[in-house]
Image (spheres, rainbow, N blue to C red):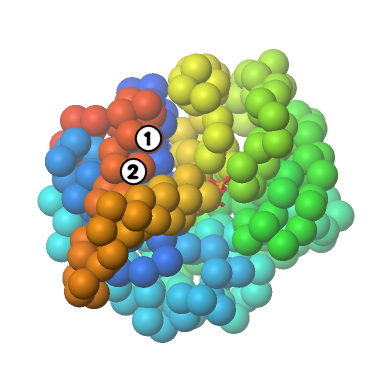
């Protein structure tokens, strides 16, 4: 198994009714931890990084690490460019070998979002890459710098958007938000069900950190196939590092290195078990 198209991972999840975690990474250690968890659970995996994070982890450095790790993995791994904002970075990620890109035009009008997304679909075609796009607006912001209000996805607009853009996966806003939730998230599972009845392509839930096991499972039951998790991994790394320093201060760099891998591994493992993708790695037929 190796680097695969995200659409193949999601189609299999659709046929067999489970969710696949898309885990944001910021360095090699997090990539290693995520792959280790997926291999141990024999699960497909999506590794991703968002455009806003590239000021910390430049794409020309982190990108090749993600692609190389995917190619070497014992399970199917898609490498996804999350929340692409500019054609320049989207193209760069495709050149590096990402098998999937998201164009986030959710801040544009519906017409503009459709037109710009179509442009990305056209570009991605020549790389045979998967395209995800968003309609409605997921709350919070990917790097925590803005307080974006949730704008629920309209079922009619979702239907039109999927049809006109010909994307492979659709990110929807059903009360989900990036970052940790203030209070309990109130997911509109009724809206999710409605959208799922009208839209044929796999649906994506952003803002996975802080959603309960029960809500994850209900969302998957009602049609969510890709679930994005970022903050929970970053927080777990921080907690693990803080805790271990409290017990005994590091005397060498590589203890820190190992702690980052371990924290990413545990968080990814925890989510894969909830999403139901354990032992789903086999029979992924289509490779790049
Ligand atoms: P969280 O940071 O809330 O897990 O959201 C991740 C995400 O949706 C990335 O696109």
Q: Quadrant of residue 87?
A: bottom right
* Image spot of residue 187 (x, y percent): 67, 25
Residue 24, given in percent of the width and then of the height, sits at 45, 56
Q: Quadrant of the C terminus?
A: bottom left
Residue at 42% x, 66% y is 26
Q: Label 2's element?
A: helix
Question: Is residue 226 among the parts visible in the rendering?
Answer: yes
Name the residue that disc number 1 marks. 271
Residue, x 69% and y 16% (percent of image)?
Answer: 190
Q: Is mark 1 within 8 Å of ligand 1?
A: no
From the viewer's perspective, tell me whether residue 156 is left or right of residue 237.
right
Q: Is residue 17 left or right of residue 140?
A: left
Q: Is residue 18 above or below residue 204?
A: above
Q: CA distance from mark 2 to mark 1?
A: 5 Å
The vertical placement of 223 against 123, above or below, is: above
Q: Report the front residue among 38 and 238.
A: 238
- Please state if 90 lies on the left or on the right of 26 as rendered: right
Which sits in the foreground, 140 or 192?
A: 140
Kindly identify the residue that appears in the image at 46 percent across and 76 percent down.
Answer: 57
- The label on residue 223 is none
Counting the numbered discs, the total is 2
Mark carried by residue 268: 2
Whether residue 198 is visible, yes or no, is no
Residue 82 place in picture, x, y as percent = 53, 59
Q: Residues within 10 Å of mark 1 (few under 14, many from 20)?
A: many
Disc 2 and disc 1 in contact, CB within 8 angstroms: yes
User: Mark 1: which secondary structure?
Assistant: helix
Residue 52 screen position, x and y as percent: 61, 69
Answer few, some or many: residues within 10 Å of disc 2's Cα (few below 14, many 20 plus, some between 14 and 19). Answer: many
- Residue at 41% x, 50% y: name it: 239
Q: Is mark 2 within 8 Å of ligand 1?
A: no
Q: Is residue 123 above or below residue 205?
A: below
């Amino acid at each position: 198994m190796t680097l695969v198209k995200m659409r193949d991972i999601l189609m299999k999840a659709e046929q067999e009714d489970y969710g696949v975690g898309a885990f944001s990474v910021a360095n090699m250690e997090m990539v290693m931890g995520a792959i280790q968890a997926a291999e141990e659970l024999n699960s497909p995996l999506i590794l991703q990084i968002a455009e806003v994070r590239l000021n910390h982890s430049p794409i020309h450095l982190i990108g090749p690490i993600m692609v190389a790790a995917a190619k070497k993995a014992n399970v199917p791994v898609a490498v996804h460019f999350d929340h692409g904002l500019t054609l320049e970075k989207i193209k760069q990620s495709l050149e590096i070998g990402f098998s999937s890109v998201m164009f986030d035009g959710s801040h544009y009008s519906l017409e503009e979002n459709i037109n710009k997304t179509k442009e990305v679909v056209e570009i991605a075609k020549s790389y045979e890459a998967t395209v995800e796009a968003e309609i409605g607006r997921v709350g919070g912001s990917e790097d925590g710098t803005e307080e974006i209000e949730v704008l629920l996805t309209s079922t009619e607009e979702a239907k039109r958007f999927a049809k006109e853009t010909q994307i492979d996966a659709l990110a929807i806003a059903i009360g989900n938000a990036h970052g940790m939730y203030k209070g309990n998230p109130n997911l509109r599972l009724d809206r999710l069900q409605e959208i799922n009845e009208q839209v044929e392509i796999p649906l994506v839930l952003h803002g996975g950190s802080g959603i309960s096991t029960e809500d994850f499972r209900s969302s998957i039951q009602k049609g969510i196939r890709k679930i994005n998790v970022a903050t929970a991994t970053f927080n777990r790394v921080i907690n693990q590092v803080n805790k271990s320093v409290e017990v005994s201060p590091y005397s060498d760099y590589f203890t820190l290195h190992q702690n980052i891998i371990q924290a990413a591994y545990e968080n990814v493992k925890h989510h894969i078990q909830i999403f139901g993708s354990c032992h789903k790695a086999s029979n992924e037929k289509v490779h790049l």
